[in-house]
């Protein structure tokens, strides 16, 4: 990022990331509200997360290998173009009043296929833009831009939904096309990628093998997996917004944006003052704070308190995300970065999309408040267990091992 050309490239990367994140967040609000409005079913909301998660699980090994063998920029651009097609299809279905539970799930499934390629490969681009010593700060800056989009996206999606779900999907599709165009035109984006080994059964599973051999990486990734899998209450936000807090789509947009407000402030702080010491202890404390904030949110019947709990949830989550992402990128050789990122993406997808299914299922069984409360308590339990299982992570002093 020191020369002017690299700065322009990094700025282009950030612009593309912001546009794609805006598109996805706006669409998520519209899909969640439209699905619950059509079905009134928490289980249907859970299915939205499940059909997004399945493609990333099934395709993960191939996606990672493709990212290590082919032009990563091209993979992301094509994936975003396909995501645009999916959202434009949802817009058409909504305008023509063809949208129902099954059609939404089918298009979201196709969206999940494209996103599985985009999400994994996008993670591998940033190390090609900055020097290793600048990577933690660059990750924090990237997170700041992303979280700003996560704040604006749900709010914009909620207000645009007043004009109709089709308007939200149309806007999101255009933003995905903008991101794909920017990435396709970027120069020097692949300067770190070198010749790749041919595809074999061993190389296909090399990412899993590598992570298993690194206790710090395995502990950090799996901690995030189980904590967010149990404590992720965002899938239930349409129910909290409509049935408990009694706010409309605009209120849902504000609730979805609240975690990003906390995450943005945390990422801005970390961009200016990267973590230097006690990163292991800080990560465990952050995940514990995530669980505690989930408990408060579950018990709240006040919009203000709920938003405050979600802000704290976002703050603590961002701290753990920056630590985990920095560890993954700094301790992974570039020739394996795609495969390791693919495994990391499966863990993240499991905690996020499959976590939405888990939240919807438990809400259908026990009720929305008990489901969110049990999730927060489960996260705190995982923190205690992981401190015992992964002492190397707990004792980790710095982001870089040397």
Image: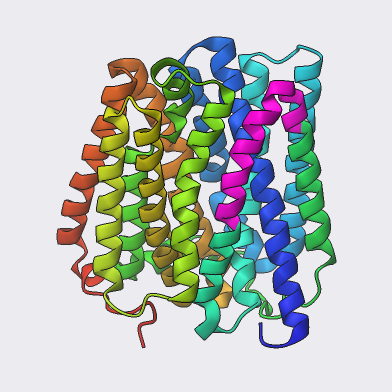
Q: Is residue 33 left or right of residue 386?
A: right
Residue under the point 76% across and 54% down:
179
Residue under the point 31% across and 69% down:
216
Query: Residue 77's image quarter?
Result: bottom right
Q: Position of residue 231 (x, y in %)?
A: 33, 39
Q: In the depicted view, which residue is nearer to us: 331 or 33?
A: 33
The relative height of residue 147 versus residue 101 in the rendered view (above or below) is: below
The relative height of residue 368 versus residue 157 in the rendered view (above or below) is: above
Q: Is residue 42 magenta?
A: no
Q: Quadrant of the N terminus?
A: bottom right
Q: Position of residue 153 (x, y in %)?
A: 63, 42
Residue under the point 81% across and 42% down:
174
Magenta span main SS:
helix
The relative height of residue 142 versus residue 168 in the rendered view (above or below) is: below
Q: Quadrant of the C terminus?
A: bottom left
Span of residues in magenta: 146-169
Q: Is residue 204 left or right of residue 347?
A: right
Query: Residue 164's image quarter?
Result: top right
Q: In the depicted view, which residue is nearer to us: 93 or 238?
A: 238
Residue under the point 80% across and 18% down:
95
Q: Is residue 267 visible?
A: yes
Q: Is residue 25 visible?
A: no
Q: Is residue 148 magenta?
A: yes
Q: How is the image coloured?
A: rainbow
Q: Is residue 253 left or right of residue 331?
A: right
């Amino acid at each position: 990022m020191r020369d002017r050309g690299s700065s322009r490239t990094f700025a282009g990367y950030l612009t593309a990331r912001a546009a794609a994140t805006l598109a996805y967040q706006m669409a998520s609000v519209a899909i969640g509200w439209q699905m619950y409005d059509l079905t009134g079913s928490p289980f249907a909301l859970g299915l939205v997360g499940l059909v997004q998660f399945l493609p990333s699980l099934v395709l993960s090994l191939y996606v990672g290998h493709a990212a290590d063998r082919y032009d990563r920029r091209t993979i992301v651009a094509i994936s975003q173009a396909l995501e645009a097609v999916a959202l434009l299809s949802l817009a058409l279905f909504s305008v023509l009043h063809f949208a129902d539970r099954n059609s939404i799930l089918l298009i979201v499934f196709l969206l999940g296929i494209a996103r599985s390629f985009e999400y994994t490969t996008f993670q591998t681009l940033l190390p090609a833009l900055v020097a290793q010593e600048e990577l933690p700060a660059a990750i924090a800056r990237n997170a700041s831009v992303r979280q700003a989009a996560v704040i604006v996206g749900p709010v914009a999606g909620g207000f645009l939904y007043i004009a109709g779900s089709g308007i939200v999907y149309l806007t999101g599709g255009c933003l995905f096309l903008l991101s794909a165009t920017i990435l396709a035109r970027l120069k020097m984006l692949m300067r770190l990628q070198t010749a790749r080994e041919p595809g074999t059964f061993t190389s296909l599973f090399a990412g899993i093998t590598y992570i298993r051999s690194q206790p710090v990486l395995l502990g950090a990734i799996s901690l995030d997996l189980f904590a967010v899998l149990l404590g992720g209450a965002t899938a239930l936000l349409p129910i909290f917004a409509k049935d408990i807090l009694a706010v409309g789509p605009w209120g849902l947009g504000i609730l979805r944006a609240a975690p990003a407000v906390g995450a943005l402030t945390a990422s801005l702080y970390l961009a200016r003052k990267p973590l230097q010491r006690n990163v292991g202890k800080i990560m465990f404390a952050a995940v514990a704070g995530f669980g505690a904030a989930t408990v408060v949110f579950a018990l709240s019947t006040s919009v203000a308190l709920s938003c405050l709990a979600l802000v704290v949830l976002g703050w603590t989550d961002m701290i753990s995300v920056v630590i985990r992402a920095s560890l993954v990128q700094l301790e992974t050789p570039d020739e394996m970065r795609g495969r390791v990122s693919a495994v990391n993406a499966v863990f993240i997808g499991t905690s996020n999309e499959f976590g939405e299914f888990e939240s919807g299922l438990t809400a259908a069984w026990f009720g929305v408040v008990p489901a969110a409360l049990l999730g927060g308590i489960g996260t705190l339990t995982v923190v205690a267990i992981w401190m015992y299982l992964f002492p190397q992570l707990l004792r980790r002093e710095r982001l870089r091992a040397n």
